[in-house]
Every structure is written in C-alpha cells, then in structure tokens.
Image (cartoon, rainbow, N blue to C red):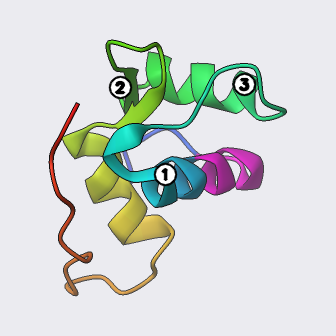
Amino acid sequence: MWNEPYLETCCRSALHRVYLAGPGGRPCGVKDDACLERLERMGLVSRNGQGRFVATDAGLARHTREVLLHEGTPAPPRSSGS
C-alpha cells in the first residue's frame, strides 16, 4: 500500500533542483517557492542557517525512489556542509 503523499510533477522537479543545489541549498524567492514550501511541510526539505532550502534525509530517499527512478541504486555521495 502506498502511504506517502503524492508529489506533483512540479514538486518532484523542485526536489530535484534542491538535490542538484547540494549542501549550499536552493534560494528562496524563485518560481518554485510554492513547491519548496510544500516539500518543507512534508519534511522533504528544510531551511539552512541562510534560509536556503536543502534536502532532508527523507527528501534524499524520496528523490532516489521517485526522481532518479533507479530503486536500489544509491544516489551519488554528497558532501555535508552548512
């Protein structure tokens, strides 16, 4: 049974852009702010100390399952930093 909220295509794209932004995060005030805020409410992204959106562990897992479409293949390693 699927028990995770559905991600609209625009929100999956926003999650991918956050992933691509890496540890530096994606800025606020861009066209996908509504999706980024929805992802934040879902716990898939959070804001760092500079107010930029970064993926949470749950967001990275969801990105791997739904965006990369290679279930079981780990996402490339990301360096941690603030």
**Separation of residues labelled 2 and 3 (CA atoms):** 15 Å
Residue that label 3 marks: 33
- Vertically, is 65 above or below 34? below
Measured as percent of width and height from the top left, residue 23 is found at: 31, 44
Quadrant where the C terminus lies? top left
- Dot 2 or dot 1: first in sequence order is 1
User: Is 53 inside the magenta-drawn segment?
Assistant: no
Q: Secondary structure at mark 1?
A: helix
Quadrant where the N terminus lies? bottom left
Q: Amino acid at mark 2?
A: Gly
Q: Name the mark on residue 21.
A: 1
Q: Main secondary structure of the magenta part?
A: helix
Viewer can see residue 81? yes
Q: Nearer the viewer, residue 7 or 29?
A: 29
Q: Is residue 74 left or right of residue 20?
A: left
Residue stretch rendered in magenta on the structure: 7-14
Q: Is residue 8 left or right of residue 36?
A: right
Q: Nearer the viewer, residue 35 or 7?
A: 35
Residue that label 2 marks: 43
Residue at 60% x, 19% y is 37
Counting other residues with Cα less than 10 Å from the Cα at mark 1, is it few (<14), some (14-19), or many (20 or more)? some
Viewer can see residue 1? no
Q: Amino acid at mark 3?
A: Asp
Measured as percent of width and height from the top left, residue 31 is found at: 84, 33
User: Residue 56 sits in which quadrant?
Assistant: top left
Q: Amino acid at mark 1?
A: Ala
Q: Name the mark on residue 65.
A: none
Counting other residues with Cα less than 10 Å from the Cα at mark 2, is it few (<14), some (14-19), or many (20 or more)? some
Measured as percent of width and height from the top left, residue 7 is found at: 60, 46
